[in-house]
Image: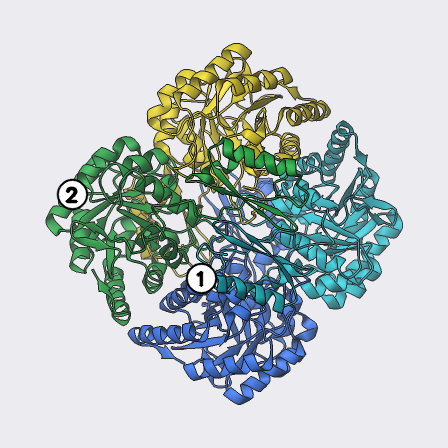
Chain colours: A blue, B cyan, C yellow, D green
Amino acid sequence: MAHTASEGEVKAVVDRVHEIGLKTELSRGEERTLVGVIGANAYAYREAFSHLSGIHEIIPITKPFKLASREFRPHDTVVDVGGVKIGGDEVVMMAGPCSVEGEEMLLETARHVAAQGAKVLRGGAFKPRTSPYSFQGLGEAGLKMMAAARDETGLKVVTEVVSPQDVDLVARYADILQLGTRNMQNYALLQEAGRSGKPVLLKRGMSSTIEEWLLAAEYVLSQGNRDVILCERGIRTFETATRFTLDLNAVPLARELSHLPIVVDPSQATGKWSLVRPMSLAAVAGGAHGLIVEVHPTPNQALSDGAQSLDFAAFDRLMSDLRRLLGAMAKQLA
Amino acid sequence: MAHTASEGEVKAVVDRVHEIGLKTELSRGEERTLVGVIGANAYAYREAFSHLSGIHEIIPITKPFKLASREFRPHDTVVDVGGVKIGGDEVVMMAGPCSVEGEEMLLETARHVAAQGAKVLRGGAFKPRTSPYSFQGLGEAGLKMMAAARDETGLKVVTEVVSPQDVDLVARYADILQLGTRNMQNYALLQEAGRSGKPVLLKRGMSSTIEEWLLAAEYVLSQGNRDVILCERGIRTFETATRFTLDLNAVPLARELSHLPIVVDPSQATGKWSLVRPMSLAAVAGGAHGLIVEVHPTPNQALSDGAQSLDFAAFDRLMSDLRRLLGAMAKQLA
Amino acid sequence: MAHTASEGEVKAVVDRVHEIGLKTELSRGEERTLVGVIGANAYAYREAFSHLSGIHEIIPITKPFKLASREFRPHDTVVDVGGVKIGGDEVVMMAGPCSVEGEEMLLETARHVAAQGAKVLRGGAFKPRTSPYSFQGLGEAGLKMMAAARDETGLKVVTEVVSPQDVDLVARYADILQLGTRNMQNYALLQEAGRSGKPVLLKRGMSSTIEEWLLAAEYVLSQGNRDVILCERGIRTFETATRFTLDLNAVPLARELSHLPIVVDPSQATGKWSLVRPMSLAAVAGGAHGLIVEVHPTPNQALSDGAQSLDFAAFDRLMSDLRRLLGAMAKQLA
Amino acid sequence: MAHTASEGEVKAVVDRVHEIGLKTELSRGEERTLVGVIGANAYAYREAFSHLSGIHEIIPITKPFKLASREFRPHDTVVDVGGVKIGGDEVVMMAGPCSVEGEEMLLETARHVAAQGAKVLRGGAFKPRTSPYSFQGLGEAGLKMMAAARDETGLKVVTEVVSPQDVDLVARYADILQLGTRNMQNYALLQEAGRSGKPVLLKRGMSSTIEEWLLAAEYVLSQGNRDVILCERGIRTFETATRFTLDLNAVPLARELSHLPIVVDPSQATGKWSLVRPMSLAAVAGGAHGLIVEVHPTPNQALSDGAQSLDFAAFDRLMSDLRRLLGAMAKQLA
């Protein structure tokens, strides 16, 4: 309460809190009175009393997320995707083209990255594009190509879903549902993905705080789905030299706050293929459980995001550097 | 092309551009060669050649949005919502509670704001909340209350829709569909709203540039819906003293770039009721076609966003100040 | 203290606080113990105990600035610059070229803006430029031209000082010392300006919070100089359509927190002359005590920032619109 | 030039460019005319013609910085600080307390970090503090303590200078002059440091782009001082979970654009000691030439920034992890 709050104002706050079904705990000091608000949902209801007169400030003491919190589950969650384990001591490489452009290029890429040690194939069939005039993806045809590439190579498949109506369709083909940065707060989609029974790769919103990201994870978890993989993919800042600012601080910080595994996407974040290798190594050195990078057989012909895709030679160099790095950290590639 | 680009590199770029169906135009200077790329969709395809060697930089010359652009339609669009005209010389006040909490409080608010000169009733029935544990709105029951308030007061109704599946439902009750900041790049929703036949109030994404915002409008317009109203509602910056940073620069700038009307939401942006009046006046002085503000009969009991809602007395003062201001600008309230 | 803090941890915090000369006040609740820290300088010393174990969070209860705060001085400060009063009911227009380029252009501009009702002449003699290869200003020669323009027109002179060594020199010629956005946290300069006896126009740092800005003002005020004028000039955000994002929210907010007058610079902020008029009107409608705008007789020949300068016709239109607006607000131009 | 530019408008631009002493080169295409502007200083003068009518856009083709650019000096610069080489294959650890608080704590820290392999002692004697009421450092007394610690341990000394007047004084005691984030655009200070003959550690401004940072380096280099070390220390973003957002992308990017060495400060950036170890490893894996970290014998008693300082045990663990990591990268600690 404010310095100058009257007894009546304190009482009005206490009464209002009780009225909405929460408990209070008063701490009276010489200079100020503090009103503790206690209850399972206290955070959500702060707005119901925040306008009362005499309040100096409302300060959340407990974290607003629960199921995602390290306190709720002290040990690291390991998401098991048909035998590929994400969240343990092995680092998982996910690689593939930005968009699925055709069967041949996809298979060629899948074979190559599998031979180099990748475990998951990435590729977009439904693309959320800023402009309605940009290439929007091949849709179900693209999903079928992904599934065919899985059948041949044994790679698991991660691909984006952009609309609640498409969750069932995508879940038929994918091993992991990707929720993209523009949809991190698309709650209908989060809940539908939560009900799908599939692991969810949840990209951080480009302007979302870590707390909001974990609350978005909470939407999925609260549907009974425990298999959420966080993915840092760059935030929007004033810097324009990179497409986004890859926020690697999020890796150790999310691991402190949450038990969920976290992977890093340096391709989308930086928008520059030459930065993908150093930022991948940095991510893993900082504690990431995996990487998701764009690889294309001929990046200069890619229909989208060519400038940020690695070609095969650059991917091979990355894998070899990664192996050396992981060796030094007493870890290994999955 | 780069300073050092060879003839072969220039040719490779030209060939690739032709391959994807666009035309080129070469400008050779003493120091550099420029390759102009011409075609209806040139912007969307830049990624298909951006990785070729010898390119120095790719610079968009024409704007990526068309239907939303001032060049496409030189005169201001006026959206007619059952006789309430948004985008002309009259400034339209939209007011109401953040959430529809119950019939009585809604009616009381609607009657009051209508008597003071508001033309549109705002109120959320479907609420996109950061936390799954927060109050999510009354759903269809809330929509029915909005419709009842319209029947009694004659106010038009604007309310948010958060999922493509709900567009039909919300369109049955609402006069204007609101698309919220978290859904500005939810393209499935944009397109569905575009097909609804209803005017769309498109809030700016909290981390969206003005160009991305106009591209989002383009998604709606490209479905044949010409009635898009832009709404500036604050962007995310480093400043934490206000909830978001209301970016009033967007008002004159959007009016330069686009023919679409623009309204301003100072309540959501600032998160502080005491800033709503000065920022409303500033918005209108800067050229806004309307305002959308939160009003609540008893803000200290509001279930959400109480601290940013005006009570009736504060709303009345705002309306009176607005009238005086508009008089000085040779405009008036709708 | 944390939920799990032991008695020993509470005691260690209390002891440490006493050790650095502050008082404590314990509030013990059922779930938590709170340690209030009391003393003139408590905020500054938080780092001296923030690392002790068992602490959950340290929350500043009182504002870190004092002399600048509204609580310290409840009534608006009016800065009297040789009869021109900034901070009262009259709005003060400051106008002139970005840089002083020569005597003739300066005089021509000064005569014009004075005839239209400006009270202060702005113009840079020392320019802090991002590139060492850009025009750095005319130095003392420029100051002399400003003083000559004052002698002829009666306008007061505001001009920037960029180094503590130059404060005496600039103070000999200027009526108001301007501290620029890049120097808002140049504390040696702030203190030297504080000792100069001249009013100080303190521009907000382009990435400074309002709190940091008021703390910078505190550096000047704490030298015994009461005449500080705040100046909002745009902050750095992700938006690139304007040069900076003019944050008009800062106007009513700074007026709530502080008694100091605040003026707005729409030219530097937006970087576009076409936005200067609407944003000037918005600033004044939102409560600004004055404006500082760039005016140039022939903007297309300006050595710096031509694109953001008004020509004489555009300035005249602004002044006429301002007068009408102020009339509606029962205010007037100084 | 714009689509619609007349011949007269093209001519006016060409004439103006010639008038300011630059050359032009015309490229006429079917749809547009391009005017190339050529000259040593072209970038700096763009504002002198940017407002002419008929111009569509002015696009810088060459980089605004020269001496700092990789094009100017293709090989990595190695700064030799009395035998400690920064910028080569060996990674240099700089460590020490945030502030010099007293002789004993400084010596104790210096001995410890030297024994563990650090080569440079950091410590602030002049502290730029946001609040005028915070501890401002011990001044020359602190510098003497740093010099004494150097004499005993052989560590080189890096310490901040905050005012041009103090450059001589600090240069008498320090081996490397540190220019802090709040002073990155304090051009008087940059130039004075450039003339000091001492290596300069140039911290990135908290809201500075990489281009502006390299331009600030250019201010130092243009005084004839070739020994500039860049230091990434976090940028200001919307994320509040860390004190700043450490932008590791800047490491590989600055190395592409410039030949200057780059070190990383994870302590100031994150503000959390628990993030220092993972972000240090990430920085080095991403290509940093060195680290500068805060170490304190008893962080819970530190007068400033205790929560972000490592204690001795945490520092030892970091050094041991670093050695392992560098081994994997075929590098080593200096």
Is circle 1 on the same chain as circle 2? Answer: no
Left/right placement of residue A124 relative to residue D164 reads: right
Density class for disc 2 (Cα within 10 Å; few <14, some 14-19, many ≥20) is: many
Q: Does residue A75 appear anywhere in the picture?
A: no
Residue C211 visible in the displayed image: yes
Find residue A312 and report its image quarter: bottom left
Q: In this view, does D193 lie above or below B61?
A: above
Residue located at (40% from left, 16% from top): C172
Inter-mark Cα distance, 1 to 2: 38 Å
Under mark 1, the amino acid is Ala
- Regarding mark 2 in the picture, which secondary structure is present there? helix
Nearer to us in this view, B328 or A220: B328
Amino acid tagged 2: Ala
Q: Which residue is at 32% across, 53% downward?
A: D259
| Mark 1 Cα shell of 10 Å, populated few (<14), some (14-19), many (≥20) | many
Q: Mark 2 points at which residue?
A: D147
Q: Where is residue B270 in the image (x, y as percent from the top left)?
A: 61, 44
**Which residue does the numbered mark 1 point to in the structure image?**
A250
Which residue extends farthest bottom?
A152
Viewer-closest of B136 and B303: B136
Q: Mark 2 lies on which chain?
A: D
Residue sitting at 41 percent across and 72 percent down? A314
Disc 1 secondary structure class = helix
Q: Nearer the viewer, residue B113 or D281?
A: D281
- The spot of residue C220 in percent (x, y) is 41, 27
Image quarter of the C terminus of chain B = top right
What chain does badge 1 belong to?
A: A
Please, which residue is most extreme toward the top here? Answer: C152
Q: Any mark on residue D128, and which?
A: none
x and y percentages locating residue C246 in the rendered image? 57, 39
Is A260 placed left or right of B260 in the picture? left
